[in-house]
Amino acid sequence: MMRIGELALASAVSRDTLRFYEQRGLIAAQRSANGYRDYPPDMVQLVQYIKTAQRLGFTLGEIGNSVAAIWQSPDPDRAVTQLLQDKLKLIEARMAELGALRDELQQRLGQQCPLNPRL
């Protein structure tokens, strides 16, 4: 078992970050008799997964919704691959929406009243 300081050092995050993850239900600690948080050694991998997912644009809510299924999956690599494919589709759809919005804004810039709804 690891204490919070050891986990923070091993996973390169702050103790406050670990407490926040615990409050959000992303990680769980066992409490010792003196109230200290104890974490299993594989918690380092989970914290690193959370940080990587955040860096790739996943919200903590999205991570929380998927992490249990991934960690319990018989084929975690396939589960992560599917999660990334789904996120990529969302990003591509959002990029298309933003492109259409950009085009409309550019059209409106040349109008006398750019907010006229008749365009």
Image: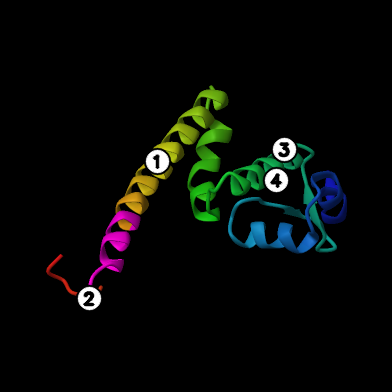
Residue 61 x/y as whole percent: 50, 54
Q: CA distance from mark 3 to mark 4?
A: 6 Å
In which quadrant is the N terminus drawn? top right
Q: Residue at x 63, y 62 (%)?
A: 23
**36 lies left or right of 57:** right
Q: Earlier in the sequence, mark 2 or mark 4?
A: 4
Q: Residues within 10 Å of mark 1 (few under 14, many from 20)?
A: few
Q: CA distance from mark 2 to mark 3?
A: 57 Å
Q: In the depicted view, which residue is nearer to us: 116 or 97?
A: 116
Q: In the depicted view, which residue is nearer to us: 29 or 4?
A: 4
Residue 98 x/y as whole percent: 36, 53
Residue 90 x/y as whole percent: 39, 43
Which three-letter amino acid code belongs to the residue tagged 1? Glu
Which label was assigned to residue 112? Answer: 2
Mark nearest the camera among 4 and 1 is 1
Count numbered badges in the picture. Answer: 4
Mark nearest the camera among 2 and 4 is 2
| Residue labelled with disc 3 | 45
Q: Earlier in the sequence, mark 3 or mark 1?
A: 3
Which label was assigned to residue 47? Answer: 4
Q: Earlier in the sequence, mark 2 or mark 3?
A: 3
Instruction: Find numbered disc 1 in the image and state the secondary structure of the residue it sits on.
Output: helix
Which three-letter amino acid code belongs to the residue tagged 4? Val
Which three-letter amino acid code belongs to the residue tagged 2? Gln
* Rendered image quadrant of residue 53: top right
**26 lies left or right of 90:** right
The magenta stretch spans residue 40: no
Residue 48 x/y as whole percent: 71, 42
The boundaries of the magenta stretch are 102-112
| Residue labelled with disc 1 | 92
Instruction: Find numbered disc 4 in the image and state the secondary structure of the residue it sits on.
Output: helix
Mark nearest the camera among 1 and 2 is 2
